[in-house]
Image (cartoon, helix red, strand yellow):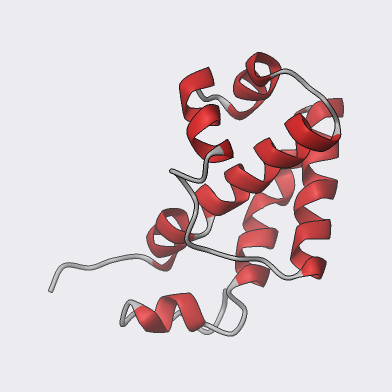
């Protein structure tokens, strides 16, 4: 079985859902254009459209607390690039229980 790092699993399952929530929040709530959101996220407008239609990032659901963190990160991202500084912390918190990793037969190292 090939070695799969915990960050890879999170990037496959959580990051697309985070991008979906950021795009949805900025476009629907903050009324920021798709073009601007795409530029901030380093995506194409077509990719942003797919996130909005839940064709990407549609599998993972967040609780209200996590959505609040994502929205705070989105607001920070629109003000500067510092929103991405929080991404590693946020990803670890989203899977603090290890549920996503366990579903993929991966055990997270004790020090993350």
* Quadrant housing the N terminus: bottom left
Q: In the figure, 102 relative to 26: above or below?
A: below
Judging depth in this view, the residue of 109 and 20 nearest the camera is: 20
Q: In the figure, 57 relative to 42: above or below?
A: below
Judging depth in this view, the residue of 112 and 87 nearest the camera is: 87
Residue at 35%, 65% in the rendered image: 5
Residue at 28%, 66% in the rendered image: 4
Q: In the figure, 90 relative to 95: above or below?
A: above
Q: Say whether residue 7 is left or right of residue 40.
A: left
Residue at 76%, 41% in the rendered image: 25
Q: Say whether residue 89 is left or right of residue 9.
A: right
Q: In the figure, 16 relative to 83: above or below?
A: below
Q: Residue furthest front?
A: 53
Asked if one can make out residue 53 in the rendered structure from this viewpoint, the answer is: yes
Residue 16 is situated, as x and y percent measured from the top left of the image, at: 50, 48
Asked if one can make out residue 82 in the rendered structure from this viewpoint, the answer is: no
Judging depth in this view, the residue of 16 and 83 nearest the camera is: 16
Judging depth in this view, the residue of 15 and 2 nearest the camera is: 15
* Quadrant housing the C terminus: bottom right
Q: Quadrant of residue 81?
A: top right
Residue at 60%, 66% in the rendered image: 61
How many labels, in total?
Answer: 0
Q: Say whether residue 83 is left or right of residue 12.
A: right
Q: Residue furthest left?
A: 1
């Amino acid at each position: 079985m090939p070695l799969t790092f915990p960050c890879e699993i999170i990037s496959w399952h959580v990051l697309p859902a985070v991008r979906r929530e950021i795009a949805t929040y900025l476009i629907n709530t903050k009324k920021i254009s798709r073009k601007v959101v795409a530029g901030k996220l380093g995506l194409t407008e077509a990719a942003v459209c797919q996130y909005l239609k839940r064709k990407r990032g549609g599998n993972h659901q967040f609780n209200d607390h996590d959505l609040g963190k994502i929205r705070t990160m989105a607001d920070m991202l629109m003000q500067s690039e510092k929103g991405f500084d929080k991404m590693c912390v946020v990803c670890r918190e989203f899977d603090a229980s290890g549920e996503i990793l366990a579903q993929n037969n991966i055990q997270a190292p004790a020090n993350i």
